[in-house]
Image (cartoon, rainbow, N blue to C red):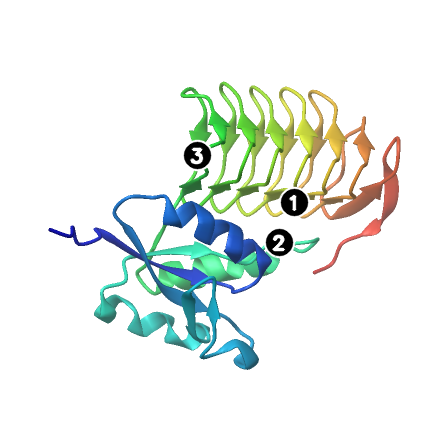
Amino acid sequence: MTTRPSIRCVLLGGGGHAKVLLDILAKMPGVAVHGILDGDPCKWGSDLLGSPILGGDDLLDSLTAQGVTHFAVGLGSVKDCGPRRRLFERAGAAALKPLTLVHLSAVVSPCAVVGDGSQLLPGCIVNASAVIGRNVIVNTRAVVEHDCIIGDHSHIASGAVLASTVTVGEGAHIGAGAVIRQCITVGAGAVVGAGAAVVNDVSPGTVVGGVPARPLGNHRP
C-alpha cells in the first residue's frame, strides 16, 4: 500500500538552485513536490527535472486549497539576497510553512541550531554551537565553524570557510571560496566577493573583495 505524503511542498524559483533542492527532496520520505512557481512566463507549462512549473507567484494564495502545506525557496543568489527574503515572506503570508532541507551528506552538529526554511547542501559542515538563521543557504562544501551566527536570508556560497565565532548579518552574501577569519563580523546586506580573505570586520551594506579583502563599494539592492 502506498503511503500518502504528509508534506506537499512547492518550490519558489525554477533555476539551477532549484535542481539541487529537488535532489534533496527526492530523498526525503513523506515529502512530495507539488510543483514549482517561477516569475518567467516562458517557463510556465514546462518542467524541471520532472516537476511541473505551474505558473507565477500569484498562484501562492490558491495552493493551500490544493493540499500544499510547505514551501522552499528555490531561488539562489549571487549578490542580492533580497529576492529570497521577499519570496520567503510572501509564502509565509500565504499560510505555507518553510521546509528545512538538509542533504544526506551534510555534516551538522547536534549542538547546532538550524532555522526554518534553511538549506544545507551537499558536503557542507555546520559545527557545534553554530546558529543558522531562517532561509539561509549553506552551499556545497561550505564550512560554518563552531559558535558562528548566520543571520536570516543569508547565503554562504560553495566552498566558503567561516572560522570560529564569525557573525554574518541578515541578508549578507559570502562568495564562493571566501575565507573569513575567526571572530569577524560581516554586517547585514554586505557582500564578500568570491575567493576573498576577510581579516577585518565588514560594515553593513559594504562590498569587499581581494586578498586581504578591501572595500570595493556599497551594495544597494
Label 1 packing within 10 angstroms: few (<14), some (14-19), many (20+): many
218 w.r.t. 39: above or below:
above
- The label nearer to you, 2 versus 3, is 3
**Residue 104 numbered mark, or none:** 3
Name the one closer to the observer, 79 or 19: 19
Question: Which quarter of the rendering shows the C terminus?
Answer: bottom right
Between the C-alphas of marks 2 and 3, the distance is 25 Å
Q: Which numbered disc flags the more N-terminal residue, 1 or 2?
A: 2
Label 3 packing within 10 angstroms: few (<14), some (14-19), many (20+): few
Pointers 1 and 2 in contact (CB under 8 A)? yes
Name the one closer to the observer, 116 or 141: 141
Instruction: Measuring from the top left, give residue 35's x and y in whole percent.
Output: 38, 66
Residue assigned mark 2: 81
Q: Amino acid at mark 2?
A: Cys
Between the C-alphas of marks 1 and 3, the distance is 26 Å
SS for dot 2: loop
Residue 180 appears left or right of 122: right
45 w.r.t. 217: above or below:
below
**Residue 29 numbered mark, or none:** none
Residue assigned mark 1: 172
SS for dot 3: loop
Name the one closer to the observer, 201 or 211: 211
Question: In which image quadrant can residue 202 be found?
Answer: top right
Q: Which numbered disc flags the more N-terminal residue, 2 or 3?
A: 2
Residue 180 appears left or right of 41: right
**Residue at the (43%, 45%) spot, across then down:** 24
Residue 146 appears left or right of 90: right
